[in-house]
Amino acid sequence: MPATDPFNVVFLGAGNIMFGSDEGPWNHSARFEKKLGDRFRMLAVVDPNLPRVHQTIATKRTDPAVRHAYLNTEVYGTLDDLIAAYKGKEDTIRVFVIGLPPAFRGGVTTGTDFELRVSKAFPNAHLFIEKPVSTGSLEDAFKLGEILSQNIPRIVSVGYMMRYLRAVSHVKKIIDEQKLIVMATNARYACAYPSCMKPDWWDKSLSCGPIVEQATHFCDLSRFFGGPVDLGSVQARALEWNEPAGKLTKIHPGVKEETIPPENRIPRATTAIWKYKTGAVGHLTHIVALQGASYSCELEIFADGYMFIIEDPYNTPRLRIRSPLSDEEEVIVCKDDDPFLEEVSVFIDAIENKDNYIVRSPFIDACETYALTCAIRIASERK
Ligand SMILES: NC(=O)c1ccc[n+]([C@@H]2O[C@H](COP(=O)([O-])OP(=O)(O)OC[C@H]3O[C@@H](n4cnc5c(N)ncnc54)[C@H](O)[C@@H]3O)[C@@H](O)[C@H]2O)c1
């Protein structure tokens, strides 16, 4: 019998990832609505930008398809206000979705200990946490990961949604069935920079730069196939903003890059290589060069006899496969694939079936991706 009971969720942060924007297909509220249907109840939203949240909730209430979920949504400006309001009824909240900027979370010290405060006040709630896990101390991120993993019944999933692409599942299945060992991964992530409209994104002191903030998706996917990385092997080079080839002409007018201290401006292209612990090699190029709106992203995975190429993960993902059977590539177009829906769906199924193992991005593993992106950034900045 499918469950019919209300499923109570609280959103911490109410920005683009949570409620959608023109920046891309991300919008967690839409995926929770789709997965849970009539069962979905948004109990509360916490975000200091109260007028915007009230407006967002009011708009949701005008949509008959989802109105039921938002009829009683409460809005709080701070986590402390939510904690105070839920004293004695903590267990009514089943899930927290944490989508505020990483500067406030991913740590264990005051100001970065958001998840810790949530997990202490609501020990039985499950957590869905956005990437990157942190922009602060790597050691503290791992400490937090250890603490979160001590409470076993709690499901914690990190928003590396590309792990849930159908193309990714298909490649994983072939690798498992054929008992392949990945020999090399080659990732290219080219963003369309006029659509990067947030001033913080252009400031390394706030976002940690485009490898930690954006290429993290492809570093994570590379690790998903290649396995643990020998961090000491990471080498990288960057094209910086003030070098002749680094000039960009179409930065969004809302971003005043000239007001960002020169040392905090982001590189335009970064290329990195590393060794996996198996001996396999990894390569990444991240580029801030394309105009228009669509990104161009591609990941190649090689193993004995096989080449897999995952293309266009944000739009219409395609998978090209060459196998020992033929030099001719098989092409699989994954129409209507929605990895954001799949990651939310798996998270909820994990909670309802009490099955931690189906979550593809546990917190500690996501810390390893953070470690790789930090190592690339540090190596690329080395003179
Ligand atoms: N998986 C993806 O593809 C994807 C896409 C977009 C964003 N993200 C991630 O989601 C996170 C948020 O990004 P965004 O684009 O939604 O940012 P955003 O700036 O649009 O929204 C962040 C929101 O957090 C709120 N906020 C700030 N401090 C807060 C606090 N202490 N408590 C509660 N709310 C607070 C802000 O007022 C804002 O509304 C980032 O980590 C980003 O990397 C992931």
Image (tube, rainbow, N blue to C red):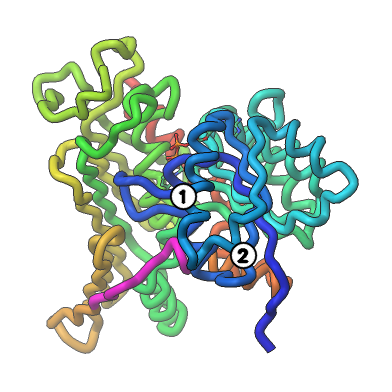
Q: Quadrant of residue 197?
A: top left
Quadrant of the rendering where the C terminus is positioned: top left
Residue 189: x %, y % from top left: 26, 48
| Observer-nearest of 371 and 356 | 356
- Give the amino acid type for the residue marked by disc 1 in the picture: Thr
Q: Quadrant of residue 25?
A: bottom left
Say few, some or many: other residues with alpha carbon within 10 Å of mark 2 (under 14 / 14 to 19 / 20 or more). many
The residue carrying mark 1 is 59
23 sits left or right of 291 in the view:
right
Specify whether 94 is left or right of 12. Answer: right
Label 2 residue near ligand 1, CB within 8 Å: no
Residues rendered magenta in the picture: 333-342
Task: Name the disc covering residue 237, or none.
Answer: none
| Closer mark to the observer between disc 1 and disc 2 | 1
x and y percentages locating residue 290 in the rendered image:
15, 41
293 part of magenta stretch? no
In the displayed structure, does residue 163 sit left or right of residue 11?
Answer: left
Q: Residue at x 22, y 45 (%)?
A: 190
